Amino acid sequence: MRKFVSSSLVIILALIFAPLHTTNAQTAGLVSSIIRKMEQNRATLSSLRSGVWMEKHNAQIGVDDITQGVMIYMPNKGRNVSVRVDWQQPRRETLAVQDGKYKLCVQRLNQCYVGSADSKNNKVSNVLGFSLNVSGSQLRSNFEQPQLLQFMNLDGRQVAHMRLVPKGNAGYKFAEIWVDNNTGLPVATKVVERNGDWTTVKLVNPQRNAQVNGNEFHLDTGGAKIIKS
Protein backbone atom coordinates (compact mmCIF):
# COMPACT_ATOMS: atom_id res chain seq x y z
CA MET A 1 0.00 0.00 0.00
CA ARG A 2 2.89 2.35 0.84
CA LYS A 3 4.37 1.79 -2.63
CA PHE A 4 1.01 2.65 -4.25
CA VAL A 5 0.67 5.92 -2.36
CA SER A 6 4.28 6.90 -3.13
CA SER A 7 3.89 6.36 -6.87
CA SER A 8 0.62 8.29 -6.88
CA LEU A 9 2.01 11.37 -5.17
CA VAL A 10 4.57 12.63 -7.69
CA ILE A 11 5.10 14.97 -10.72
CA ILE A 12 8.02 15.79 -13.51
CA LEU A 13 10.27 15.98 -17.34
CA ALA A 14 13.62 16.25 -19.31
CA LEU A 15 14.33 17.57 -22.82
CA ILE A 16 17.09 18.74 -25.24
CA PHE A 17 20.66 19.58 -24.23
CA ALA A 18 22.60 22.52 -25.71
CA PRO A 19 26.14 23.10 -24.38
CA LEU A 20 26.88 26.35 -22.57
CA HIS A 21 30.29 27.95 -23.30
CA THR A 22 31.19 30.53 -20.62
CA THR A 23 33.98 31.16 -18.16
CA ASN A 24 33.53 30.29 -14.47
CA ALA A 25 33.13 33.98 -13.60
CA GLN A 26 30.50 34.47 -16.29
CA THR A 27 28.65 31.35 -15.17
CA ALA A 28 28.64 32.49 -11.53
CA GLY A 29 27.21 35.85 -12.61
CA LEU A 30 24.52 34.18 -14.70
CA VAL A 31 23.57 31.85 -11.83
CA SER A 32 23.27 34.81 -9.45
CA SER A 33 21.03 36.58 -11.96
CA ILE A 34 18.78 33.51 -12.29
CA ILE A 35 18.49 33.15 -8.52
CA ARG A 36 17.54 36.84 -8.24
CA LYS A 37 14.77 36.29 -10.77
CA MET A 38 13.56 33.24 -8.80
CA GLU A 39 13.51 35.38 -5.65
CA GLN A 40 11.47 38.08 -7.43
CA ASN A 41 9.04 35.44 -8.67
CA ARG A 42 8.72 34.00 -5.18
CA ALA A 43 8.10 37.45 -3.67
CA THR A 44 5.37 38.35 -6.19
CA LEU A 45 3.72 34.94 -6.70
CA SER A 46 0.36 34.86 -4.92
CA SER A 47 -1.19 31.94 -6.82
CA LEU A 48 -0.71 29.67 -9.80
CA ARG A 49 -2.96 27.74 -12.16
CA SER A 50 -1.42 25.32 -14.61
CA GLY A 51 -1.65 22.10 -16.50
CA VAL A 52 0.77 19.57 -15.05
CA TRP A 53 2.72 16.72 -16.60
CA MET A 54 4.55 14.14 -14.54
CA GLU A 55 7.03 11.45 -15.53
CA LYS A 56 8.24 8.97 -12.93
CA HIS A 57 11.10 6.62 -13.90
CA ASN A 58 11.80 3.35 -12.11
CA ALA A 59 15.46 2.56 -12.83
CA GLN A 60 15.29 -0.97 -11.43
CA ILE A 61 12.74 -2.24 -13.94
CA GLY A 62 13.16 0.42 -16.63
CA VAL A 63 9.53 1.59 -16.53
CA ASP A 64 8.25 5.15 -17.04
CA ASP A 65 4.89 6.25 -15.69
CA ILE A 66 3.41 9.41 -17.26
CA THR A 67 0.45 11.24 -15.74
CA GLN A 68 -1.32 14.44 -16.82
CA GLY A 69 -3.75 16.78 -15.14
CA VAL A 70 -4.33 20.30 -13.84
CA MET A 71 -3.23 22.01 -10.66
CA ILE A 72 -3.58 25.08 -8.47
CA TYR A 73 -0.97 26.36 -6.03
CA MET A 74 -0.77 29.01 -3.32
CA PRO A 75 2.28 29.82 -1.18
CA ASN A 76 1.72 30.20 2.55
CA LYS A 77 3.82 31.44 5.44
CA GLY A 78 6.83 29.28 6.20
CA ARG A 79 7.38 26.10 4.23
CA ASN A 80 3.72 25.08 4.03
CA VAL A 81 2.06 25.43 0.64
CA SER A 82 -1.44 24.72 -0.61
CA VAL A 83 -1.60 22.49 -3.68
CA ARG A 84 -4.37 20.70 -5.50
CA VAL A 85 -3.72 18.37 -8.42
CA ASP A 86 -6.54 16.76 -10.39
CA TRP A 87 -5.06 13.91 -12.37
CA GLN A 88 -7.05 13.20 -15.52
CA GLN A 89 -4.95 10.73 -17.54
CA PRO A 90 -4.41 7.80 -17.47
CA ARG A 91 -6.36 7.58 -14.19
CA ARG A 92 -8.56 9.97 -12.24
CA GLU A 93 -7.14 10.90 -8.85
CA THR A 94 -7.18 14.11 -6.81
CA LEU A 95 -4.51 15.25 -4.39
CA ALA A 96 -4.94 18.18 -2.02
CA VAL A 97 -2.24 19.53 0.30
CA GLN A 98 -3.20 22.14 2.88
CA ASP A 99 -2.37 23.07 6.48
CA GLY A 100 0.47 20.55 6.66
CA LYS A 101 -1.67 17.58 5.58
CA TYR A 102 -2.21 15.77 2.30
CA LYS A 103 -5.26 13.92 1.05
CA LEU A 104 -5.24 11.70 -2.03
CA CYS A 105 -8.56 10.37 -3.32
CA VAL A 106 -8.59 7.52 -5.86
CA GLN A 107 -11.89 7.55 -7.66
CA ARG A 108 -11.94 3.96 -8.95
CA LEU A 109 -11.20 2.57 -5.47
CA ASN A 110 -13.46 4.99 -3.59
CA GLN A 111 -10.59 5.47 -1.14
CA CYS A 112 -8.75 8.49 0.26
CA TYR A 113 -5.24 8.36 1.71
CA VAL A 114 -4.35 10.99 4.31
CA GLY A 115 -1.08 11.87 6.01
CA SER A 116 1.45 14.54 6.88
CA ALA A 117 2.62 16.87 4.13
CA ASP A 118 6.17 16.31 5.41
CA SER A 119 5.91 12.59 4.69
CA LYS A 120 8.38 11.16 2.18
CA ASN A 121 5.29 9.78 0.42
CA ASN A 122 4.10 13.30 -0.36
CA LYS A 123 6.35 14.20 -3.28
CA VAL A 124 3.88 16.44 -5.07
CA SER A 125 4.14 19.39 -2.72
CA ASN A 126 7.75 18.51 -1.91
CA VAL A 127 8.75 18.74 -5.58
CA LEU A 128 6.64 21.81 -6.33
CA GLY A 129 7.55 23.53 -3.07
CA PHE A 130 11.19 22.71 -3.68
CA SER A 131 11.31 24.94 -6.76
CA LEU A 132 8.45 27.40 -6.21
CA ASN A 133 8.90 28.17 -2.52
CA VAL A 134 12.68 27.88 -2.02
CA SER A 135 14.49 31.12 -1.15
CA GLY A 136 17.83 32.30 -2.46
CA SER A 137 19.38 31.90 1.00
CA GLN A 138 18.11 28.29 1.16
CA LEU A 139 19.65 27.58 -2.24
CA ARG A 140 22.98 28.92 -1.05
CA SER A 141 22.95 27.20 2.36
CA ASN A 142 21.49 23.81 1.38
CA PHE A 143 23.24 23.22 -1.96
CA GLU A 144 26.63 23.33 -3.54
CA GLN A 145 27.20 26.13 -6.07
CA PRO A 146 24.33 25.68 -8.61
CA GLN A 147 25.53 24.42 -11.99
CA LEU A 148 24.18 26.23 -15.05
CA LEU A 149 23.91 23.49 -17.67
CA GLN A 150 22.38 25.39 -20.59
CA PHE A 151 19.93 27.94 -21.91
CA MET A 152 17.24 26.30 -24.02
CA ASN A 153 13.74 26.47 -25.43
CA LEU A 154 11.10 24.59 -23.44
CA ASP A 155 7.56 24.58 -24.81
CA GLY A 156 8.13 27.87 -26.61
CA ARG A 157 9.70 29.73 -23.69
CA GLN A 158 13.37 30.48 -23.04
CA VAL A 159 14.59 28.85 -19.84
CA ALA A 160 17.78 28.36 -17.84
CA HIS A 161 18.51 24.73 -16.95
CA MET A 162 20.38 24.30 -13.64
CA ARG A 163 21.53 21.36 -11.51
CA LEU A 164 21.42 21.52 -7.71
CA VAL A 165 23.54 19.12 -5.64
CA PRO A 166 22.52 19.05 -1.95
CA LYS A 167 25.01 19.42 0.85
CA GLY A 168 25.22 16.71 3.50
CA ASN A 169 23.22 13.50 3.60
CA ALA A 170 20.08 14.46 1.67
CA GLY A 171 17.42 11.92 0.71
CA TYR A 172 18.15 12.36 -3.00
CA LYS A 173 21.19 12.58 -5.26
CA PHE A 174 20.54 15.88 -7.06
CA ALA A 175 17.80 18.03 -8.56
CA GLU A 176 17.44 19.96 -11.80
CA ILE A 177 15.25 22.98 -12.45
CA TRP A 178 14.20 24.85 -15.60
CA VAL A 179 13.60 28.54 -14.85
CA ASP A 180 11.72 30.94 -17.15
CA ASN A 181 14.19 33.65 -18.21
CA ASN A 182 11.52 36.36 -18.15
CA THR A 183 9.47 35.64 -15.03
CA GLY A 184 11.86 33.61 -12.86
CA LEU A 185 9.14 30.94 -12.52
CA PRO A 186 10.52 27.39 -12.31
CA VAL A 187 8.49 25.63 -15.01
CA ALA A 188 9.97 22.15 -14.56
CA THR A 189 11.72 20.29 -11.75
CA LYS A 190 13.47 16.94 -11.72
CA VAL A 191 14.56 15.05 -8.60
CA VAL A 192 16.97 12.11 -8.98
CA GLU A 193 16.98 9.58 -6.14
CA ARG A 194 20.10 7.76 -4.92
CA ASN A 195 18.89 4.49 -6.46
CA GLY A 196 18.61 6.06 -9.92
CA ASP A 197 14.83 6.59 -9.88
CA TRP A 198 13.72 10.07 -10.90
CA THR A 199 10.60 12.17 -10.99
CA THR A 200 10.03 15.19 -13.25
CA VAL A 201 7.25 17.75 -12.92
CA LYS A 202 6.49 20.15 -15.77
CA LEU A 203 4.01 23.02 -15.67
CA VAL A 204 1.95 23.38 -18.86
CA ASN A 205 0.79 26.91 -19.77
CA PRO A 206 1.18 28.24 -16.20
CA GLN A 207 -0.84 31.32 -15.22
CA ARG A 208 0.89 33.37 -12.54
CA ASN A 209 -1.35 35.11 -9.98
CA ALA A 210 -4.53 33.71 -11.50
CA GLN A 211 -7.67 33.90 -9.37
CA VAL A 212 -7.69 30.99 -6.90
CA ASN A 213 -10.21 30.52 -4.09
CA GLY A 214 -8.88 28.98 -0.88
CA ASN A 215 -11.92 26.71 -0.75
CA GLU A 216 -10.69 24.97 -3.90
CA PHE A 217 -8.07 23.17 -1.82
CA HIS A 218 -10.74 21.54 0.33
CA LEU A 219 -11.29 17.97 -0.86
CA ASP A 220 -14.62 16.42 0.11
CA THR A 221 -14.07 12.71 0.73
CA GLY A 222 -17.79 11.92 0.62
CA GLY A 223 -18.37 8.30 1.50
CA ALA A 224 -14.87 7.18 0.54
CA LYS A 225 -12.89 4.91 2.83
CA ILE A 226 -10.18 6.86 4.72
CA ILE A 227 -6.73 5.26 4.97
CA LYS A 228 -3.99 6.86 7.08
CA SER A 229 -0.49 6.54 5.65
Image (spheres, helix red, strand yellow):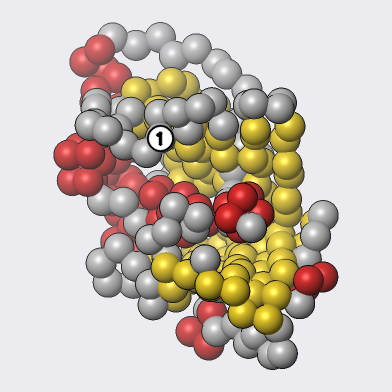
The answer to whether residue 13 is above or below residue 42 is above
The answer to whether residue 120 is above or below residue 97 is above
The answer to whether residue 108 is above or below residue 197 is below
Q: Residues within 10 Å of mark 1 (few under 14, many from 20)?
A: some
Q: Residue furthest front?
A: 1
Q: Residue at x 53, y 72 (%)?
A: 228
Residue 180 in the image: x percent, y percent?
A: 47, 42
Disc 1 marks a residue whose amino acid type is Tyr
Residue 110 in the image: x percent, y percent?
A: 76, 77
Q: Residue at x 40, y 29 (%)?
A: 173
Instruction: Please name whichever residue, 29 or 55, is drawn nearer the observer in this view of the structure.
Output: 55
The reply, left or right, for residue 95 in relation to residue 123 is: right
Numbered disc 1: secondary structure: loop
Can residue 20 be seen in this snapshot?
yes
Q: Residue at x 34, y 67 (%)?
A: 80
Residue 8 in the image: x percent, y percent?
A: 64, 55
Quarter of the image for residue 206 reads bottom right
Give the quadrant of the N terminus: bottom right
The reply, left or right, for residue 126 in relation to residue 24 is: right
Quarter of the image for residue 109 reads bottom right
Dot 1 corresponds to which residue?
Answer: 172
Residue 179 in the image: x percent, y percent?
A: 45, 40
Total numbered labels: 1
Instruction: Please name whichever residue, 97 or 158, is drawn nearer the observer in this view of the structure.
Output: 97
Q: Residue at x 53, y 43 (%)?
A: 188
Can residue 74 be seen in this snapshot?
no
The reply, left or right, for residue 122 in relation to residue 53 is: left
